[in-house]
Image (spheres, rainbow, N blue to C red):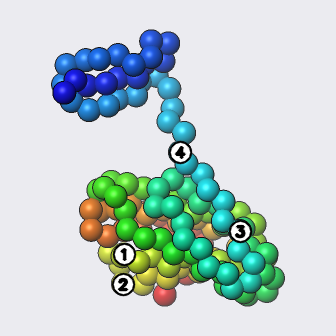
Amino acid sequence: MPRFKYELGSGIVLKPGKGFEVSGCPIKESLETISLAGTETATAKNYGWTSIVTTGGGTAAGAITLGSGDYAGQEKGFVFTTDDGDAVVEVTTLVEANNTFTAADAMDLLLFVWTGTAWSTVKNTGWTAS
């Protein structure tokens, strides 16, 4: 199987070896937006970034579930972008003991990496784990 390399200006170039490589240009991450009103629930994609918007007011906690990853090293991020009530992220399989995260303030951020068997918290800015 040849190695495929995407080079800016050249397109896809076949090289000896295996795999796929991107050179000279960025890869755009997937961005999904989940809007929760009150105590609604949703399931997040297991890749890219999720922007969370709440419209419930007060401390209403809409819950977002994060399922398993697909491969070791896969990253998943959440940012609480619009705060009109708390947001909750529930991680189905997590290395750490506390798998429910609650954000109360806009710009709170979570970043996970899939170990191959469970998510592990890489960065938590402002979320309360329980």
Q: Residue type at mark 2?
A: Ala
Quadrant containing the N terminus in the rendered view:
top left
Task: Give the residue at mark 3.
Answer: 35
Q: Would residue 107 be seen by someone viewing this image from the given angle?
A: no
Q: Quadrant of residue 7?
A: top left
Q: Are marks 1 and 2 in contact (CB under 8 Å)?
A: yes
Q: Are marks 2 and 4 in contact (CB under 8 Å)?
A: no
Q: Residue type at mark 3?
A: Ser
> Against 48, is 87 above or below?
below
Q: Give the Cα separation between the discs numbered 1 and 4.
A: 23 Å
Q: Is residue 55 left or right of residue 2?
A: right
Q: Give the Cα separation between the discs numbered 3 and 4.
A: 19 Å
Q: Residue type at mark 4?
A: Glu
Task: Give the residue at mark 2.
Answer: 97
Residue 6, given in percent of the width and then of the height, sits at 40, 23
Q: Nearer the viewer, mark 1 or mark 2?
A: 1
Label 2 neighbourhood size at 10 Å, few (<14), some (14-19), many (20+)? few
Q: Are marks 1 and 3 in contact (CB under 8 Å)?
A: no
Task: Give the residue at mark 1.
Answer: 94
Mark 1 or 4, nearer chain start: 4
Q: Give the Cα separation between the discs numbered 1 and 3.
A: 24 Å
1 and 66: which is toward the camera:
1
Furthest residue in direction top, as rendered:
10
Task: Give the residue at mark 4.
Answer: 29
Mark 3 or 4, nearer chain start: 4
Q: Give the Cα separation between the discs numbered 2 and 4.
A: 28 Å
> Against 8, is 34 above or below?
below
Q: Quadrant of residue 71?
A: bottom left
